[in-house]
Image (cartoon, rainbow, N blue to C red):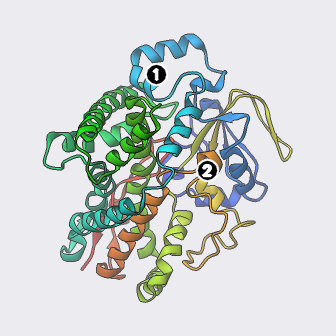
Amino acid sequence: MSLPSHHPFTLEYTSNPQPVFADIHTDNRFLPLEDLGAVAVHGYDAVRAFCDHPLMTRNFAESGVVDKQAMAERAERWPTLENSLSTGEGEETKRANLLRVLLAQDFRPRMIRKMATTVSEVVSKVCAPLRSESDVDVVKVVQEVPLIVISTLLGIDETTKDAELFLSAGPSYFRGINPIASDSDRDKAEVAAVTMIDILGRTVENRRSNPQNDLVSQVVEIADNRGDVDPMDVVRAVVILVAAGTDTTRLTSSLAIRTLLDNPEAMEAMREDRSLVKNGMMELLRYESPTKYLVRVATQDVEFEGQTVPKGSLVLLSIMGAGWDPRVFPSPETFDPQRDLRGSLSFGFGSGYCLGSHLARLQVTTLVDFVLDHLPSTATIDRSQTTWDAGNLMLREITSMPMHIR
């Protein structure tokens, strides 16, 4: 059976969804995905409304529409994913609120300074091949930047086995946490989640007795001052932060480099005027978002602009599709680092706004600056050898992107 062009598991939609957007935005209709029991939504107004809709939830278990026996079987097979991280009465709201309290100061000034220094050092070290090599695989060069950054900020010693385990566990965890991940992906994610929680649990206990200038120490201090936070809730909050800020940043890096090389005039304008980089970074996220679909579940029938999302449907929200809505962003096919991006949904909206946005912005901006410093606009990407992973529901992942630099 052939899949429709807007299906998340097609190579067409994963690698080049723009033609689909052009067709959908003629009337911004909702598109059914019967095999997934889902509705795909691309129009800016609907995506914005559904990101934080009272009749939709991000938590499969709390939706009230999932078979209880099936949930029990899932909890038995994947207890960490289903119980520790994502289920329970009101747990989604409670944990989101806890994380916002623990990080309410958005990394105090000393942590922001440490973040900037750490990101710059990691980018310079990891991306050094862009300065000196003639041919590289961009994905292999940049993919470790966000995981090394977050593990360093968390205070996980890069010389230890924990750092190696943490870096290898991250991608498996992210891939398996969506509600329709395959059983094999969830098996891997369960192992990865246990590994990450174990490592962070040890780090939390260590920082209680030996505080450092790192993120875990900061969160532990805030939690201890509150006096009403369980240590494991601190660990889970940090795991959520890691999930929020690393995998999407990793994928953004490859997409950003490709977009800059595809738009050499804009790249040169940003190279000459670095004041454009901050807004240009947000334009990169609009133009080639790493997010394929955000996932919600409709807890009731939802009416919107004459269209209905049936109760129990998965609701797939296209952040990139919203960024290509010509009613909001005229001539969306043009990459314009000076575009007015007020209202951008690249980091979500409302209670679903990405808590890792500050760190993600910092990493992408630092990477773009490094690329502008060292990568000639004459560098070329081998399109015939560029490969994608179409099996990820939520993310657009380039798995290999060979590039000739000089």
Quick one: quadrant of the C terminus?
bottom left
Image vertical order of residue 48 relative to residue 138, above or below: above
Q: Residue at x 31, y 53 (%)?
A: 153
Q: Position of residue 357 (x, y in %)?
A: 49, 57
Secondary-structure class at tag 2: loop
Callout in the foreground (1, 2): 1
The first of marks 1 and 2 along the sequence is: 1
Image vertical order of residue 378 relative to residue 24, above or below: below
Q: Residue at x 43, y 86 (%)?
A: 268
Q: Which amino acid type is marked by label 2?
A: Ser
Q: What is the quadrant of residue 239 in the picture?
A: top left
Q: Residue furthest right?
A: 306
Q: Position of residue 53 (x, y in %)?
A: 71, 41
Asked whether 388 or 166 is in front, the reply is 166
Find disc 1 in the rendering and name its residue. Answer: 83
Q: Position of residue 75 (x, y in %)?
A: 46, 17
Quick one: quadrant of the N terminus?
top right
Find disc 2 in the rendering and name its residue. Answer: 318
